[in-house]
Amino acid sequence: MSELALIGLLVALLAASGIWLVRVHRVLSIKRHLEAVFDLVDPVVVVSNSFRIVRANRAFADLVQRSWKGLLGHSLGDLLGTFLPPTELIAVTERKSFRDRRWNAPTGDRLFDIHVVPAGSHDGWVLHFQETTTLNQIRQELLARNAALGRLTQSLQGEIEMAREIQGGLLPRELPRVEGIEFVVRYLPSRPVGGDLYDVLPLEGNRLGIFIADVSGHGLPAAFEAALVRMSFLSRAQTGNSPAQVLAAMNRDLRQSLAVGHYATAFYGILDLDTLELRYCRASHPRPAILRKGGEVLQLGSQGLFLGIVDSARYKEAHINLVSGDRLCLFTDGYYEGLRRDGRRLGYEGFLTRLDAAPGDDLEAELVRIEDEFEPGSEEDGSEDDRTFLALNLRSAHPRKVARLLTRFPPGFAGIPSSFSTAQESWELVEQFADQLQKAGWPQKLVRKAQLAASELTVNAVVHGGRDRPDATARCVWSIESDRCLFAVEDDGPGFDPDRLPDPRAPERLTLDHGRGIFLVRRLVTELWLDHRGTTASFVLLSPPNDPPQEA
């Protein structure tokens, strides 16, 4: 080999060795870096089949407070004691974990999850100690907060249920029965409780008071403010004042009771059933509409500010004469202001067009279709709203209020009510009722049932309706046919909530000597109705086919 070739070979060898040295340096650097990371992570120890320490990182040495270099060869059980799970459980052929092992450290107890992984070639195991002390503390705090939140939610739910019951008392349990007028009602609060109100109030002189209102806001605050509006309306409307006078008085009431910035819209009209004249007044409420046969739509507009905004608000009254076939519609803006699924709003005019196009008696079905078109609102974006609708369909040119006592009797019933004020007088009337049943050929056992049920209701009217008032009176009336009898009694007492009658079978009520009358009547008759806050009670008793009437 020439001298020149030898020199070239040496140069090549030197270059190759330099590259190799660089690579070795990089590998050693990476190794030292990995070892440093290995030492700083969770405690890790490698043990042999005899559970002698083969390798451990500095984190494990710090845990057992031993010298890192002096750990090799030591028994793992001697270092960890009962902190280490039984060795027969550790000797696994696949990954296994032991949760929440407690390590008694000088600074306080610490919790670890111990993860065991078999080492290669089945010559030992790798134990990874993952500390969960902080995580467990966070978990316990979270559980405690969840429990507190659960208690708070349960408390709030109870308050919401109570608010729902209170609001249920604000809405009419039943509308007055008027022959010649059919009512259509839809009430849909956006939350469990809402801020809309409606009512139809029988007034003196064969008149009806028609009311609807919408309180600002949503949910519980609006529901409580609606209660204030309701109380103000009832106290003002029952005096017989004109619509403008009622709204003006309500405005004064609400200026004193509503929070600053809160208000209500309202419409109040008085319908004279003899002349069908409607006198009305509006407090910035959406204009009601009259839908007439032939497609004519009349909007009822009159001037008046929101209720509860300013002291000097004035309300201008207007009037219109209705005719048979008219449909008077009152509603809140939730029916046309909300965003629909097609991204558009129905609008006031569009809503009236849909109502007017509803065929015949299909108005309620059309309202349901409109409701289904709305995009569900949310509390966050303020797009939710209550929806309330009240319509009066005039079927006659001469509508007539039906007395409360006759609520469950068929149209045209001509029975004459009888008055009584004492238990003795009520028993005498019940005896007349039983005698007429016998003369009509009713079986004796059904006569006894009817007599007992009627006696319970009339005595209740005297005892609970009269409340020892010397001027208190009650009334009863009945009708008898061959296969059914209908009996009703009415008192002028304060009434009660039929839905909240206590169950006399409850253990705490078994020893009481009262409170079983309604319970007994329900089991004697075919059907029992408690109307007008329980001041009117009616029952029907049927004579079944297998119990034909007897000859008189």
Image (cartoon, rainbow, N blue to C red):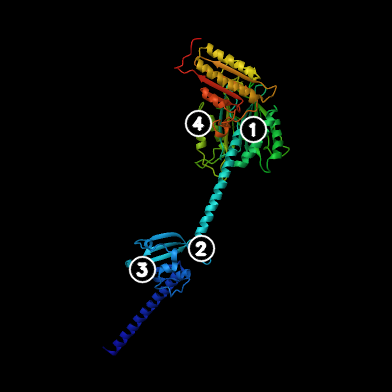
Q: Residues within 10 Å of mark 3 (few under 14, many from 20)?
A: few
For the point 56% across and 50% down, the residue is 148
Counting residues from the start of the chain, the first of labels 2 and 4 encountered is 2
Left or right: residue 478 versus residue 60 is right
In what element is the residue under mark 1?
A: strand
* In the foreground, 529 or 275: 529
Q: Residues within 10 Å of mark 1 (few under 14, many from 20)?
A: many
Q: Residue at x 30, y 88 (%)?
A: 4
Marks 2/4: CA–CA distance: 68 Å
Q: Which residue is mark 1?
A: 267
Q: Position of residue 61 (x, y in %)?
A: 46, 71
The residue positioned farthest toward the bottom in the image shown: 3
Which residue in the structure is indicated by mark 2? 109
Residue lying furthest right: 312
Mark drawn on residue 235: none
- Disc 4 marks a residue whose amino acid type is Ala
